[in-house]
Image (cartoon, helix red, strand yellow):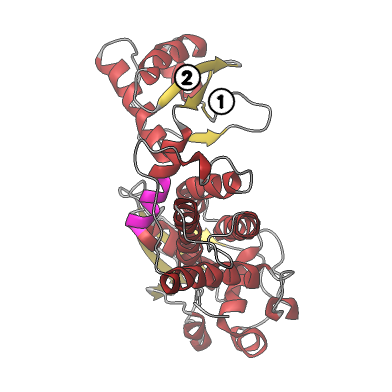
Amino acid sequence: MTPADLSRTVLHAVRRAVDEDALHAPVPPRVRVERTRPGGSGDYACAVALQLAGPAALPALEVARILRDRVAAEPGVGRVEITGPGFLSFTLAAPAEGDRAVLTAVREQGLAYGHGDALRDRILQFHHAREVRAAVTAHAVRRLVLAQGARVRTSCEAEPDPDWARLGVTIDAYGPPPAPLTGIRPVPAGATAAELLERLGPDAARWGLLRAAGHDRAALGPDLLVQGEANPLFRVRYAHARARALTRGAAALGFTAETPARGEDPAAHLAHHPAARPLLDLIADHPGVLLAGARHRAPDRVARQLEAVAHAFFDFHDACPPLPAGDEKPSAAHRSRLALAEAAGKVLAGGLSLLGIRAPEHL
């Protein structure tokens, strides 16, 4: 069960409780589940009982008890606990099955893994200043909300800078702002598009403009061009290129990736190794990060997620080599490791694409 599956499961439990007259409250459009923080109980937690307590005219603990029994009966959920004032904490059954589901979803959805329809009912209008960071940020936010099903138009307060096109920026209109609208107002870059393109090129310029939160000043120095691990953009793109190289190397050795089959115990392949768990968890959390980036108009969240995936990928790659060495023959372990490495590569490429940045296969 993926986090998205669990969210739908909890929402289904709420709907059942309302349909059965056990709970008298409006059914929310979606339910948010989050990975449990260190020291917490279970794998995931949810505050939906606190959200529904007021409309239901019941204590949050009572709402939590109503929902607990219904969620616990769902397949894939091992245990449901009530903690604090009414939080629901979930321990998933058969974690290996959840890992298999995540890897299967990435394989099937490819670069679109994490896209969804959570914002399908939204019609959004973004408006920004005639300034390069505002333009690039608005364009990235546009990509994020489109990937979640929203309809969107982007406008600028004045005629756009012609050099924005070289950064991939497009707008639908310019002039006085229409209403209703959402203003995109990051701290200005302090440079023009032409200056940034000359110094950094389009990919490094976009990364520098998007990596910092909008209320922080963007780092746009020469470090963005350094071909080394200290440069997060290089590390993210290198992790993607390395994942693609692993696929080519496996093909040369005569084998391909293989996700463990349902019912097969992949403990010998992935789950037992401490280096695999962080990467599996980050890939499972990726759809939630993309949705949060869209809702909060925060492409910097996506950039930080990609950095974390790249870091976890290299830790996994070094500790669990996906390719056999020397005279070693390809095994089920190698096929499973390659599946995880390929999933990481797709997450990195898909995330970079949403930021408007290329993901080369060779660096």
| Residue at image location 71% in from the left, 69% down from the top | 229
Question: Which residue position is annotated with label 2?
Answer: 79
For residue 88, the mark is: none
The quadrant in which the N terminus is found is top left
Which residue is at the front of the view, 335 or 54?
A: 335
The quadrant in which the C terminus is found is bottom right
In the rendered structure, which amino acid carries the disc numbered 1? Answer: Gly
Tell me, yes or no, if residue 338 can be seen here: yes
Q: Residues within 10 Å of mark 1 (few under 14, many from 20)?
A: some
Q: Is residue 348 left or right of residue 15?
A: right
For residue 359, above or below residue 25: below
Which residue is at the front of the view, 347 or 319?
A: 319
| Residue at image location 44% in from the left, 30% down from the top | 94
Image quadrant of residue 214? Answer: bottom right
Question: Which residue position is annotated with label 1?
Answer: 42
Residue 282, percent across and down?
55, 48
Element under label 2?
strand
For residue 61, above or below residue 217: above
Which residue is at the front of the view, 244 or 184?
A: 244
Which segment did they paint magenta?
A: 102-109
Tell whether position 30 is magenta: no
Q: Quick check: marks 1 and 2 in contact, CB under 8 Å?
A: yes
